[in-house]
Image (cartoon, rainbow, N blue to C red):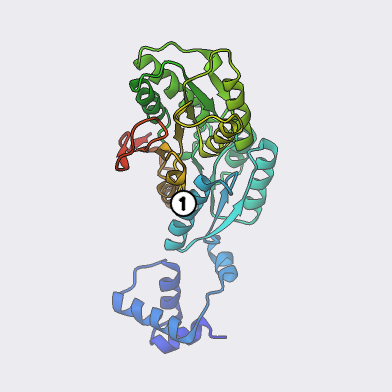
Amino acid sequence: MPTMVDVARSAGVSVATVSHVLNDTRPVLPGTRQAVLDAVEELGYTPNTLARSLVTSRTRSIGLAVSAISNPYFTEILQGVEASALEHGYSLLIADPHDDPGHERKVVQLLHERRVDGMIVAPSADPRDLVAYLGRHRVPAVFLDRVVEVPEGDGAPRFDQVCAEGAEPTALLVGHLAGLGHRRIALVAGRPGLSTTRERITGYRHGLAAAGLPFDERLLVHGDSEADGGERATAALLSRAVPPTALVTANNAMTIGALRALRDRGLSVPGDLALCCFDDFAWADLFTPRLTAVAQPSRDLGAQAVRLLLDRLAAPDRPARTVRLPCAFVHRTSCGCPEQTEQAHVTAPERTLP
């Protein structure tokens, strides 16, 4: 097996220069750098990452803890994280906290014990133990998709965060349905306690107010961010003495559940109930009718999380940032509009908050 000495001899440089090229620890002239890379390729040299981590105290690895990896939304986020991590020479260790605070804490500890350089975490509805652990051990971390309010105070940990806009896009869906004449617009909201749930409920209420419609608490139900929960919540709405005429579902899994509930009752979309959903997915336009949706920038969220984490590793003491990325409104036909060329427009500009 070729060694670093063999690479140095082949490239006509010192072992130290080979180390600087492979580890990006010092600028190297372009010609010299290319000679080293050519020698690495020709000899088939593979760096000893374990030995390197013992010297640098860095493993060039990132821990990723996200729940529901089977969800297409999180799958696309994972693709964004992986592509950006690989681009910067990092590998991934992935774990699923199952949206359970106790399991979340264990998963994060296991990743930490694997000596990852930092973590990207989609926090649960009760992230107190998570925040306490990361803060106590000074683990560089980025919160993804769901924001966490950490109380201000001396020594309180501060974390970078990245998420999509939630309130304004939901208000847009409600306003669109109201503009089509609907007056009883319901929301199937996500798991209580999640920031995404709170923001989409806020957007729902703002959308109603902007349309001059009253808020009726009987038209707001929780589907717990899962398909089965979405099905139960939609069934409950349909059993009301005066059911809604339009529905907003707050994530793609609950949209599937809502469609099941409607199918089981022989109801059609949009004939019996107009439907708009938060979260687009690759096959949303294969349904009949095609689903009108808010599309989140999933891969961009993953890539941005990596960039924030690498910035934190490079400058551990810099102020924490919260980056909010815009969503896009994808206009199809489940809302009751006639068939048309699919349209999408961004709902808000990107924001970075101190």
Q: Does 99 appear above or below 171?
A: below
- Quarter the N terminus occupies: bottom right
User: Is 31 or 265 nearer to us in this picture?
Assistant: 265
Density class for disc 1 (Cα within 10 Å; few <14, some 14-19, many ≥20) is some
Furthest toward the front, the residue is 266
Q: Position of residue 125 (x, y in %)?
A: 60, 31
In this rendered view, identify the residue nearer to me: 165 or 312.
Answer: 165
State the residue at coordinates (70%, 38%).
102
Count of numbered badges drawn on the protein: 1
Confirm whether residue 126 shows in the render: no
Residue 268 drawn above or below residue 139? above
**Picture quarter containing residue 348?**
top left
Where does the image place residue 237, in percent across and percent down from the top left?
57, 21
Give how far across and how far down residue 81 sits, in percent: 47, 53
Is residue 130 or residue 177 the one in the foreground? 177
Residue 254 x, y percent position in the rendering: 55, 35
- Whether residue 349 sits left or right of residue 286 in the image: it is left
84 to the left or right of 211: right
Residue at x 49% of width, y 34% of height: 147
Res. 244 in view: yes
Toward which corner of the image does residue 343 lie, by quadrant? top left
The amino acid type of the residue labelled 1 equals Leu
Secondary structure of the residue carrying numbered label 1: helix
Residue under label 1: 313
The C terminus: image quadrant: top left
Residue at x 44% of width, y 52% of height = 310
Residue at image point 36% right, 82% down: 35
